[in-house]
Amino acid sequence: MSKILIIEDEAAIRRVLTKILTEESDTYEVFEAADGLEGVEILKKDDFDLVICDIKMPKMDGVEVLEATKKIKPEIPIIMISGHGELETAVQTMRLGAFDYISKPPDLNRLLNTVRNALDRKNLVVENKRLKKKVSKNYEMIGKSDNITDIKNMIEKVAPTEARVLIIGPNGTGKELVAHWVHDKSDRASGPFIEVNCAAIPSELIESELFGHVKGAFTSANKDRAGKFEAANGGTIFLDEIGDMSLSAQAKVLRALQESKVQRVGSDKDIKVNVRVVAATNKDLKKEIAENRFREDLYHRLAVILIKVPALNDRRDDIPLLVEHFSKKIAVAQGIAPKSFSNKAVKLLQEYDWTGNIRELRNVVERLLILGEQEISENDIKLFASK
C-alpha cells in the first residue's frame, strides 16, 4: 500500500481528492489533515509515500510545510496545489524541492499521472538507498561471533545517522573495515571516502594534508592545494591512528568539527565543509589525555559512538570463516588453484596466539597456500605457520 497524506484546509477539496485517489487504485491509503500544522505533526509520527499539499492555508502555509517536511522526511515527494493567484509561489516551491504543482481545480488525468510519477520516484529513491547500503565485497566483515554480531548491529543503527564514530582496537583487527562499513551503509555512500593515516604523515605536514595550503605558505608550497577535508566534502573522512596526531592539528580538527569549516595553511579564509568524521586508534586515548598528548574536548567530539574491535584471540570461533574467506581471495589474486584446509589444520590455527590479529592470519593463510600441499594439513601448519 502507498500511503498518501492530503494537507488541505477546504474540506470539500479534501473529500474530492480522497475520492479520486481511492477510486483510482485500491493500493492507495489516503489520510487527511485540515491545516499545515496538523499535517506536519502527522508526518513526524508516521511514514508516508507522498504528500499532496495546498499552498494557502491557516496556521502554516504550504511553503512552510514543504520546508519542514524536507527537514524531517526529505525523501517524501510533495505535490503542491495552487490557486490561480499563487503561480509564482508554486514555482518557488519547485525550487525548494517540491515534486510538482497542480492548479485548482485539479485536472483528473494530470493529478493521477503526477501521483503515479511521484510514487515511482519515491520507490526509485528508496531502492537506490538500499543498493548504496550494500557493502562492497572488498570490505566484507567476516564472522558470526557475538563480538562481530554486536558490531554489525551497532553499525546498522549508527550508519544512517550523522553521528561521529571512534573505532578503537589493537593493530590488525580491522578498524578500517568498520570505517568502510559505516560509510557504505550511510546516506553518504555515494560521496567520497577519504582515508588519512595520521601516523604515516610527518607532524609538520599533517595540517597541510588535512586542510590544504595556499601558494607560498611554506618553502615547497608552489601552488594552492586542497586538503583532505575539502576532498571529503559530501562524504566521510577517516582519520586513522588519530592518537598520533599533533596537538596543533588536533586543535584545527576540533574547530572543523565545531564550525564545519576549515582554513588552508597560510590563509585566513574559511571554507565550508560538509563531512562526517570517523576516527580510529590503537591507543588508550584517556591515558593520552591524562598525559597531555590528546585533547579531551576533541575526544568527546569524536567519541559520540564508540566501537571497540576485538582482538582475533577474543573471536577464535570466526577463524574457520576467515581462513575460508582469505583462501578464496588469495587464490584468485595469486592466480593459483584454491586449496582446502583439513579440520585438524583449522583447529590448530584456532589455538595459535594471534598477536598480529587478522592481518597476521591473512599472511599465514597466504604462506600456506603457496607452500602447502593441495589440502593444507596439520603438518603444513606446523611447518609454515610457525612464528
Image: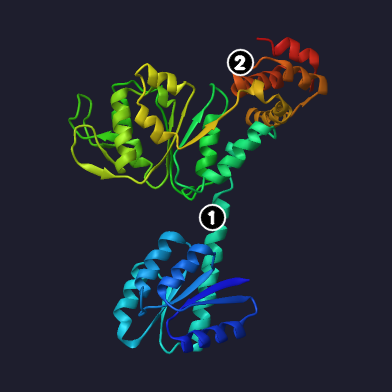
Query: Residue drawn at (29%, 42%), measured in percent from left and top?
Result: 259
User: Residue at (69%, 14%) from the top-left corner?
Assistant: 385
Q: In this view, does 68 lie to the left or right of 356?
A: left
Is residue 256 shown left or right of residue 168? left
State which quadrant residue 341 falls in: top right
Rendering quarter of residue 127: bottom right
Q: Name which quarter of the figure residue 232 lies in.
A: top left
Name the residue that disc number 2 marks: 355
| Residue 225 horizontal side relative to residue 131, left or right | left
Count neighbours of disc 1 (C-alpha within 10 A) and say few if under 14, some if 14 to 19, many if 20 or more: some
**Which quarter shows the C terminus?**
top right
- Label 1 sits on a secondary structure element that is helix
* Residue 76 visible in the current orientation: no
Distance CA(mark 2)–CA(mark 1): 39 Å
Q: Position of residue 73 (x, y in %)?
A: 47, 61
Check residue 129 in the rendering and tell me which mark sits there, or answer none.
1
The N terminus appears in which quarter of the rendering? bottom right
Image coordinates for residue 237, horizontal then vertical, percent: 41, 38
Give neighbour class at mark 2: few <14, some 14-19, many 20+ (Cα, 10 Å): some
Per the image, label 2 sits on a secondary structure element best described as: loop
In this orientation, does residue 330 appear?
A: yes
Q: In this view, does 288 lie above or below 142?
A: above
Give the amino acid type for the residue marked by disc 2 in the picture: Thr
Mark 2 or 1, nearer chain start: 1
Q: Please state the horizontal and vertical placement of residue 349, each as a whole percent of the image.
A: 73, 19
Q: Residue at x 39, y 48 (%)?
A: 234
